[in-house]
Amino acid sequence: MPRIDKEKIAVGVRLILEGIGVPLDDPNFAETPQRVADFYEELLSSKLTEEDYKYFSKYGDLVVVSGVRAHGLCPHHLLPVEYSVDIAYIPRDNVVGISKLVRVVLEEVKFPKLQEKFTEDLAKKVADLVGSDDVLVIVRGRHYCMVMRGVKKDATVITTAARGRFKTPELRLEVIRVIELSGQLPQARV
């Protein structure tokens, strides 16, 4: 993961503000370059350690984590992308804590990349983490580069990465049914 250079980001934001005619002595914009630099550091920096990826007991059937929300940046316009990620895997030996799958999503979204690459990279990371080639990742993305510019339309982009036994249509359909069921269950209040 590249190091975030907040000073360079702040300089770049100052140049953008000047380029669009914003007076930098306006108190509403005085701290904007630093705020944007802080935001990019938060969005794109990872603070996870090996301790965050502990393994748990043996289990040999389907594990599905559905609806993981994450935010990234598109590589073409550096505009936000809202993701909803579903992950399924069949453990070989041990299962990982469910939060570890969420952590992998949050780790992998930390660099601007195409949704297709994000999906592929995530599937590889999950397979490495869980020690199984039987992995399915489904990513739904709402791209603000489409919403705010260009075609100016809201649409959902769906990408998948199937590995191992998930290449068979029957198992993929079972996961999709489980994901659909998860949307019908009562949601926990936070």
Image (cartoon, helix red, strand yellow):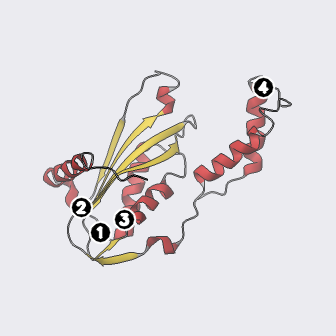
- In whole angstroms, how far apart are the C-alphas of marks 3 and 1? 15 Å
Neighbor class of circle 1 (other Cα within 10 Å; few <14, some 14-19, many 20+) is: some
Question: Which residue lies under the disc numbered 4?
Answer: 22
User: x, y (%) of residue 132?
Assistant: 29, 68
- The residue at which mark 1 appears reads as 132
Name the residue at 75% across, 40% down: 33
Residue identified by numbered label 2: 164
Q: Nearer the viewer, residue 69 or 78?
A: 69
- Tag 3 near tag 1, CB within 8 Å: no
Residue 134 found in image quarter: bottom left
Tag shown at residue 98: 3
Three-letter amino acid code of the residue under disc 4: Val
- Residues at discs 1 and 2 in contact (Cβ within 8 Å): yes
Whichever of labels 2 and 3 marks the residue nearer the N terminus, that label is 3
Q: Amino acid at mark 2?
A: Gly
Query: What residue is drawn where x is 46% and y is 34%?
Result: 143
Amino acid type at mark 1: Ser
Q: Nearer the viewer, mark 4 or mark 1?
A: 4
Residue at image point 59% right, 52% down: 44
Q: Tell which circle, 1 or 2, labels the residue nearer the N-terminal end.
A: 1
Res 51 label: none
Mark 3, residues whose alpha carbon is within 10 Å: few (<14), some, or many (≥20)? some
Q: Earlier in the sequence, mark 4 or mark 3?
A: 4
Disc 3 secondary structure class: helix
Marks 4 and 2, how far apart at CA: 54 Å
Viewer-side label of 2, 3: 3
Q: Is residue 132 left or right of residue 170?
A: right
